[in-house]
Image (spheres, helix red, strand yellow):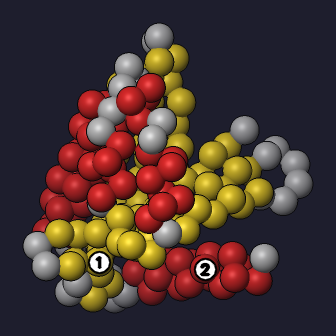
């Protein structure tokens, strides 16, 4: 529980740093990169390519699912490490019938090799859309922008 709180505190610190940066024009390069990365991810999801989805993460990356109920505290479930992330995306072939889209709302380079992205992920199944807020922190490793952490915000 303490480790989870620390992780979320770390992510919140990244967000607050990004928001509190001196006011200036939105970093167009960060927005373009964020849109390219999330569009490619949606295409992998749509194809049901679980291996490619999991390969976007660093070996010690994590996915945090934060479920927010109308009443009570949020429930957080964390999946850490490549093996746990692969298990999540093993369901991807069954998800291929869904129409996913990502809308980037905010992107900023926190460091030259660290990108913060927030936005909305939505899937459409048989005409019904479901949306989730998301926050990603990505780090440039070689030529790839690997996901350090992904938080999905699920509202019930």
The numbered dot on residue 7 is 2
Specify the quadrant that holds the C terminus.
top right
* SS class, disc 1: strand
- Asked if residue 147 lies left or right of residue 4, the reply is left
Q: Position of residue 19 (x, y in %)?
A: 44, 78
- Asked if residue 119 lies left or right of residue 48, the reply is right
* SS class, disc 2: helix
The numbered dot on residue 139 is 1
The numbered dot on residue 155 is none
Specify which label sits upstream in the sequence, 2 or 1.
Answer: 2
- Neighbor class of circle 2 (other Cα within 10 Å; few <14, some 14-19, many 20+) is some
- Neighbor class of circle 1 (other Cα within 10 Å; few <14, some 14-19, many 20+) is many
Quadrant for residue 79, please give it: bottom right
Q: Position of residue 52 (x, y in %)?
A: 27, 49
Q: Residue at x 24, y 37 (%)?
A: 43
Q: Residue at x 34, y 88 (%)?
A: 22
Evaluate whether residue 91 shows in this view: yes
Foreground pick, 2 / 13: 2
Specify the quadrant that holds the N terminus.
bottom right
Q: Position of residue 47 (x, y in %)?
A: 27, 31
- Count of labels shown? 2
Q: Residue at x 39, y 73 (%)?
A: 59
Q: Residue at x 53, y 30 (%)?
A: 130
Q: CA distance from mark 2 to mark 1?
A: 16 Å
- Asked if residue 155 lies left or right of residue 145, the reply is right
| Rendered view: 108 above or below 31 | below
């Amino acid at each position: 529980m303490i480790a989870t709180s620390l992780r979320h505190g770390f992510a919140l610190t990244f967000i607050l740093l990004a928001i509190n940066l001196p006011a200036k024009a939105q970093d167009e390069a960060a927005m373009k990169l964020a849109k390219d990365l999330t569009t490619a991810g949606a295409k992998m999801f749509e194809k049901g390519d679980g291996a490619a989805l999991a390969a976007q993460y660093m070996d010690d990356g994590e996915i945090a699912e934060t479920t927010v109920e109308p009443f009570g505290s949020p429930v957080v479930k964390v999946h850490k490490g490549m093996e746990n992330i692969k298990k999540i995306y093993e369901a991807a072939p069954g998800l291929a019938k869904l129409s996913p889209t990502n809308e980037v709302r905010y992107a900023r380079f926190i460091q030259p090799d660290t990108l913060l992205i927030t936005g909305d992920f939505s899937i459409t199944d048989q005409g019904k859309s479901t949306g989730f807020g998301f926050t990603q922190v990505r780090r440039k490793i070689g030529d790839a922008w690997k996901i350090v952490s992904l938080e999905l915000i699920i509202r019930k």
